[in-house]
Amino acid sequence: MNYKPSYKYIPPITWSFLTPFYDFFCAIGGLGGRFKMKILDSVALSDGLVVADIGCGTGVFLKVAKQKHPRVTFMGLDPDRQALAIAERRLAKANLDVELTEAFAESLPLADGSVDMVFSTLAFHHMPDEIKQKAIREILRILKPGGFVVITDFGPSSKFLFSWLLPVFENVEYLRGNLQGHIRKYLQEAGFVDIDIRADISILRLELIKATKLVYAS
Ligand SMILES: C[S@@+](CC[C@H](N)C(=O)[O-])C[C@H]1O[C@@H](n2cnc3c(N)ncnc32)[C@H](O)[C@@H]1O
């Protein structure tokens, strides 16, 4: 990976020494396999599709997704080597063929129009606002026309957590844009259409935003 971020990178659970415990924290916070399955089930997948999980972390989503849809090609991308190593072990243990790549969302090593669907879960609140915008433009670039993205993350309806729990673990500066509804705004500004928002995901009241890349009429 040649790209180096010019901002402070935030590991899965704020400090890298906690990365081995990320799955444990997810499980007790209601963000484990069942939560990932709920995200997967928010859309219909068919055999032969190519799907990328951006900011895939330790690979729990990729595992449940590949087990449910063995004929879909899944790939996981994340800048964190430690998290990717956990994902690699998890997928190998389950005998699942999923390609993992070290990459930042704002600089994706994927060709234009090469992916049918993108998922990104809890990664956008790890990015400063201008990086959220770049990541959304990258996702638009790699998607095929008519393809879509599903971003699940903190949004305006998670504000109630902001005052107490989150500042302990998370970078408040990066989180602010999420809480102000910037993800949906940036999707709209980038040209995504049919933006659909569900604000009842998990006890943390995360937002699940689905947005489609326009198919231009010729
Ligand atoms: C809270 S974890 C979520 C992991 C996984 N998606 C999940 O739901 O369990 C956030 C992830 O975002 C990744 N991340 C941080 N900055 C990123 C960036 N600029 N581009 C892509 N991923 C990033 C971190 O390495 C981490 O794995």
Image (cartoon, rainbow, N blue to C red):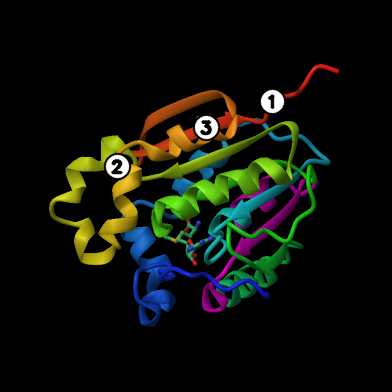
In the rendered image of this protein, does residue 8 appear above or below residue 32?
below
> SS class of the residue under badge 3?
helix
Nearest the camera: 17 or 31?
17
The CA distance from mark 3 to mark 2 is 18 Å
Q: Which mark is residue 25?
A: none
Residue 8 lies, in percent from the top left, at 40, 71
Residue at left 39%, top 39%?
182
Nearest the camera: 96 or 205?
205
Q: Would residue 33 be visible to someone looking at this image? A: no
Task: Look at discs 3 and 1 and give the one toward the viewer.
Answer: 3
Nearest the camera: 211 or 53?
211
Between disc 3 and disc 1, whose residue precedes? 3
Between disc 3 and disc 2, whose residue precedes? 2
Pointer 3: residues within 10 angstroms few (<14), some, or many (20+)?
A: few
**180 on left or right of 72:** left
Residue 56 quadrant: bottom right
| Marks 3 & 1, CB-CB < 8 Å contact | no
| Marks 3 & 2, CB-CB < 8 Å contact | no
Residue identifier under label 3: 189
In the rendered image of this protein, does residue 132 appear above or below residue 23?
above
Q: Is residue 217 magenta?
A: no
Residue identifier under label 1: 214
Residue identifier under label 2: 179
Quadrant containing the N terminus is bottom right
**162 on left or right of 40:** left
- Give the amino acid at mark 2: Leu
User: Magenta stretch?
Assistant: 63-83
In the rendered image of this protein, does residue 140 appear above or below residue 42?
below
